[in-house]
Amino acid sequence: MTTDRADDPASPYGRLKAAFARHAALSDALGTLHWDTESMMPTGAADRRSQSMATLRVVAHEILSEPALADDLDRAEADQRDLDARDRANLAEMRRIHSHETAVPADLVAASSRAVSAAEMAWRSARCDADFKTLKPYLQSVLDHQREIGAAVGAALDLPLYDALLDRHDPGMRAAAIDPVFADLAGYIPEILPTVLEAQRQTADAPAPPGPFALPSQKDIAETLMARLGFDFERGRLDTSIHPFCGGSTNDVRITTRYDENDFSAALMGVLHETGHALYEQGRPTGWLDQPVGESRGMTLHESQSLFIEMQISRSRAFQTFVRPLLIDTFGGRGGDWDEETLYRRAIRVEPGHIRVDADEVTYPLHVILRYRLEQAMLAGDLALGDLPGAWNDGMRDLLGLVPPNDTLGCLQDIHWPAGIWGYFPTYTLGALAAAQFAEAADESLRQSEGCSIEELVAEGRFAPIVQWLRSNIHSVGASDSTGGIIQRATGRPLNATAFKVHLQRRYHAPARTTA
């Protein structure tokens, strides 16, 4: 139990909690503004919005870089007798965040924010026009600022530049740990892909039912499934944007997706993916929501939650059993295009393509590995920004046997780099590995506690026990443990690719051999 001195607002730790609570409030405001920018803001408001967000980021930065806060950190760390385990973890997170914040000067924070806002707007036009050259000067500014930020944080934390940026998104994760895993997958997946595709060809075609599918109906079924999974609409909502994402603020979690009237499945799977993120945000530890220890524990775990819901649950045969009546009621489906087996074959169809967010789970890691390698090269200065489109196309050919016909289907498809999100991409595939481990562990646990498997629960639409397992083992832990510690405790072993490979072997009849 937290003691009175730990709650004393006049104590060093009490002052720290108040400062970080103010910072959390500003972060919430920025989150809502970012959601609005991506989904609803008129283009004419872009310049003023950029200034407003840059100002808020500077104010947030100043809160955590006050000299008095550094003194309070030293004093609180020197005497932790009155702090319980969660408070001690909170204090450790305060120190980590403070180290990142104080490493970067305020003028660089403001300049980076302005560069990002301009690049995001330029990206929208460039993506529509398939014109990388239009984006290049704006992206160059973002890249230059990211190099400065990475160098500053790296110097403060004694980390290489890439690891310093990666640490913002996944504390403690390092390229040296990622490289061998990605090298293994970059060999394993192309090796098994022909076998997977051949097995797929041996089954009957699973054509998509003809549209159109009314967009209001697509949104209705999306919201129905969000609610069945446990999304709290009193603390969140669903909207539309160019690039699907989960954002917003504490107790106001915003999901966005994009719709295609000829294909309901793309938007639906996007919503289910983002619902995994949202459930994590809505399941963070109550009582600590304005403190660092109450935050989610990095993006590998965040991506694991979205991929758990999308890949492990929503693309399973059991989920098709559950969702089929809802689809038929919503879209008026009739005939063989809507039977369970056909729905399942469409859900797990493997088809190498150009677009990461539309990729199947077999080829998806190759998209991530490409981006991981390219951003490392750009940050290191080994790849000039002007050469990015060609390098992208070469990488796609080498990994997936495809060459994008234009930049929209190539290096312009993702908003991450224009948005200043560098060092983030590897967490997508690390999350897929963790999701497979969590699914194995949850299945074993639920067989004991519920007397049935995850597959049986999903087929019956009984998602609550599954989500509760995630709540107990991941969501409610917040940032009180490391990514590795949370995975080890929940699954009994460290993060690795074994469960993911077993999952591919079972679902796609992939061979068990590896190239490791």
Image: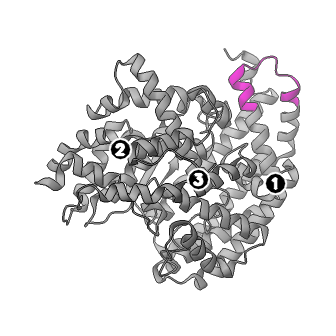
Say which element carries label 2.
helix
Q: Nearer the viewer, mark 1 or mark 3?
A: 3
Question: In which quarter of the view is residue 152 placed?
Answer: bottom right
Relative horizontal placement of residue 441, taking residue 487 as reference (left or right): left
511 and 168: which is toward the camera:
511
| Magenta stretch contains residue 349 | no
Residue 278 visible in the displayed image: no
Q: Residue at x 81, y 54 (%)?
A: 153
Residue for point 26% across, 56% down: 218
Q: Position of residue 248 (x, y in %)?
A: 50, 50
Looking at the rendered structure, the kind of residue marked 1 is: Val
Q: Is residue 214 above or below residue 502?
A: below
Q: Amino acid at mark 3?
A: Leu
Q: Residues within 10 Å of mark 1 (few under 14, many from 20)?
A: many
Contact check, label 3 and label 2, Cβ < 8 Å: no
Secondary element under disc 1, as helix, strand or loop, is helix
Instruction: Please name whichever residue, 344 or 39, is drawn nearer the observer in this view of the structure.
Output: 344
Q: Is residue 385 left or right of residue 463?
A: right
| Residue bearing mark 2 | 314
Numbered label attached to residue 185: 3
